[in-house]
Image: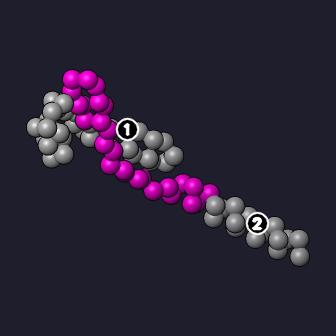
Amino acid sequence: MQEKQGIMMTKNILRNEQYSIMELKVINKAFAIDISQSKLTAAKGELVVNQGKSTVYVKEIREFNYDNEGIEELIKF
């Protein structure tokens, strides 16, 4: 009986190790806006989680005027 339980525990441990090795790569889109008195700065990027490690990649940064035209451009961005 104890031998059977030991074998079952070993199988479960191996199964759990396989799941931890086979982690998925997850990519989330990211968007940030910095608001100052004279301009708006926006950045597009990605947050990538691969095997438990997170990395942020900035793809594009643009500055916009702090007026109606700049806000319209920001919305299109």
Residue 77 can be seen in this image: no
- The quadrant in which the C terminus is found is top left
* Mark 1 / mark 2, whichever is N-terminal: 2
Picture residue at 45% right of the left edge, 41% below the top: 54
x then y, percent, for residue 41: 24, 31
Extent of the magenta region: 17-42
x then y, percent, for residue 52: 51, 46
Examine the image and state in which quarter residue 55 appears.
top left
Examine the image and state in which quarter residue 16 appears.
bottom right
Q: Within the magenta stretch, is there residue 26?
A: yes
For the residues bearing labels 1 and 2, Cβ distance under 8 angstroms:
no
Q: Which sits in the foreground, 31 or 18?
A: 31
Q: Which sits in the foreground, 23 or 4?
A: 23
Picture residue at 62% right of the left edge, 57% below the top: 17
Three-letter residue code for mark 1:
Val
Q: Within the magenta stretch, is there residue 18?
A: yes
- The quadrant in which the N terminus is found is bottom right
Q: Residue furthest front?
A: 68
x then y, percent, for residue 64: 17, 32
**In the displayed structure image, the side of residue 51 where residue 17 appears, left or right:** right
Picture residue at 39% right of the left edge, 45% below the top: 48
Q: Which sits in the foreground, 66 or 62?
A: 66
Instruction: Please say if 39 is above or below 11.
Output: above
Residue indicated by mark 2: 9
Q: Residue furthest right?
A: 1
Instruction: Please say if 29 is above or below 57.
Output: below
Q: CA distance from mark 1 to mark 2?
A: 39 Å
Residue indicated by mark 1: 56
Three-letter residue code for mark 2:
Met
Residue 19 can be seen in this image: yes
